Image (cartoon, grey):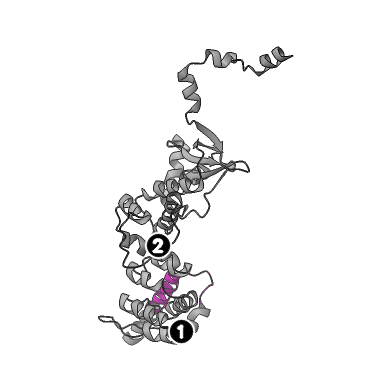
Amino acid sequence: MAKSSARDSIKLTSVDELFSTEESRADSQREKVLEIPLSEISDFPNHPFKVKADEAMLEMADSVKQYGVLVPGLVRPKADGGYEMVAGHRRKKASELAGKETMPCIVRGLDDDAATIIMVDSNLQRESILLSEKAFAFKMKLEAMKRQAGRPSKEDNYSQVGNNFSTKTSSDELALQTGESKNQIFRYIRLTELILPILDMVDEKQIAFNPAVELSYLAENEQQDLYNTMQSEDCTPSLAQAQRMKKLSQDGRLNVDVIFSILTEEKPNQKEKFNIQRERIERFFPKNFTEKQKEDLIVQLLEGWYKKRQKEQER
């Protein structure tokens, strides 16, 4: 009985293992490029980079249709099945537009923080990045780096002036990797505190970066009052005005009337503007008209009125 038990405990080498070479065993451990159905790939949670069907995307889709995806994406397996995109969101969108059903991808097991860092780094290489994309990307990567290092989430304060530490912090490392100063990284991250409509104005260059950083210190309801006032008065704050609003907010003295008073004061070197209350003319336009279409129509009507008046005077 004892001999039988001893025999059972012996693990015999399989035929495959017996004849496999060290090279083939190493090859089995290497990452492979697989054709994965697009339907099985979900987007990275809270992906900060916008994937738009713009002209550049349409050009990429044409390239994918003709040549396929030349650089594989990077995905990680999900616990409940399928895959999560880490790097390659634009290639996935282009593949969808090109009518493809699959996409070549490298499958790699990654934890949340490692995946976040790779996702951010792969997108920061792009030539054109919106300020909001950079802001949220820096915030996500910095938090991931802190967790990886076992540092507290409040290791650094998101301040305008930065901090001095005797030891190297995650933000020091991020500054070294990105080529941005530590202070500038914090200023980018401040933009994530803006409400979405104001952040969109920053991306569209209607509000400059420096005033936007100051406005990020306003409470959410104050930012909403500011946005409504900017829309109704067709104006945006200068850096000095943004700094004043920040100080008044910190003192608990900022309200919609104060915001209106600051925004409507004449700025230095400001050209005199001719303003029409929006409520007086809004009802004349189709609901889907953009601001540019409204402006063009007003100019067109004025030109027609002017030409008609000229003819009447010539009679």
Q: Residue furthest front?
A: 2
First reached walking from the N terminus: tag 2 or tag 1: 2
The residue drawn where x is 41% and y is 68% is 201
Q: Position of residue 114 (x, y in %)?
A: 46, 45
The residue drawn where x is 35% and y is 77% is 242
Q: Examine the rendered structure and indicate whether residue 240 appears above or below residue 125.
A: below
Q: Name the residue tied to disc 1.
A: 256
Q: Position of residue 157 (x, y in %)?
A: 39, 65
Query: Is disc 2 surrounded by few (<14), some (14 to 19) or many (20+) residues within 10 Å?
Result: many
Q: Name the residue tied to disc 2.
A: 189
In this rendering, would 39 be left or right of 307?
Answer: right
Instruction: Please tell me the numbered disc located at residue 245.
Output: none
Q: Nearer the viewer, residue 76 or 12?
A: 12
Q: Nearer the viewer, residue 61 or 73?
A: 73
Query: In the picture, residue 118 is in which quadrant?
Result: top left
In this rendering, would 238 be left or right of 278?
Answer: left
The residue drawn where x is 50% and y is 79% is 282
The residue drawn where x is 54% and y is 39% is 100
Q: Examine the rendered structure and indicate whether residue 178 appears above or below residue 253.
A: above
Q: Position of residue 234 (x, y in %)?
A: 40, 78
Q: Is residue 286 magenta?
A: yes
- The three-letter amino acid code for the residue at tag 2 is Ile
Secondary structure of the residue carrying numbered label 1: helix
Magenta span covers which residues? 285-303
